[in-house]
Amino acid sequence: MKQAIHLAVIITALTTYSLPGYSRPGLPKKDAENMIGYYDDSTAVVTIPSLDKMLEEIMNLTGLKASFELKEAKVMNIEAYISHRKRYILYNPEFIARINAAAKNKWAVLTLLAHEVGHHLNGHTIRKSGSTPSLELEADEFAGFVLNKLGATPQQSQEVMKYIATTEGSSTHPGRESRIRAIQIGWDKAAAESGVIIAKN
């Protein structure tokens, strides 16, 4: 019984992200079944940079100084947030650990972090609307652009969507395929800037 409850909590944790206070409905059964397989308590040792180091990589790329604080918090996963005119990226360390364990590389969490940076830099967090599909896609596109510049392939940039995005969209977040396309658009923009063309499968 405890294991079933624990698993339900994990699945619920993967359904809400980005701006606080806007959660997605429960996962459809087929999505929940697909996601369960990604969390296998693997004991493989993988060296992955700290979130602070990842944020530094992202901000160095933009040429901007981070005007927000990265902070561990009791949130469902990871989210961009403003409180008392101070900007934060709040994260649940258990959620981050599970994504790292599932992906076994740094790219999945880097995509999440770049997505949240995109919310701040695009001014999404100062709006009153909270999460909307269009804002989420803008942040995904930014993440794709950043991940290209950091050396990720399109597949590495999009991988995290296997773990967090549902097939169908909601009133706050688009569906998985739309998010994957947005990341590809951002990745392609960065590739065009650098003159690098990679054939798509």
Image: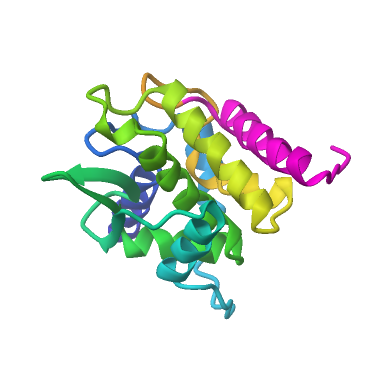
Q: In the image, residue 75 lies at what x, y percent?
A: 25, 51
The residue nearer to you, when weighing 110 against 84, is 84
Using the rendered view, name the quadrant where residue 51 is placed. bottom left
Residue 191 visible to the viewer = yes
Is the stretch drawn in magenta largely helix, strand or loop?
helix
Residue at x-position 26% and y-position 52%: 88
Q: In the image, residue 48 lies at what x, y percent?
A: 54, 73
The residue nearer to you, when weighing 63 against 170, is 63
**In the displayed structure image, the side of residue 178 where residue 123 appears, left or right:** left
155 is higher (above) or lower (below) than 23: below
157 is higher (above) or lower (below) than 52: above
Q: In the image, residue 167 lies at what x, y percent?
A: 55, 28
Q: Is residue 131 magenta?
A: no
The quadrant the C terminus occupies is top right
176 is higher (above) or lower (below) than 161: above
Q: How is the image coloured?
A: rainbow
The residue nearer to you, when weighing 141 against 194, is 194
Q: Is residue 184 magenta?
A: yes
Residue at x-position 45% and y-position 72%: 50
Residue at x-position 42% and y-position 61%: 96
Count of numbered circles in the view: 0
The residues colored magenta run 174-201
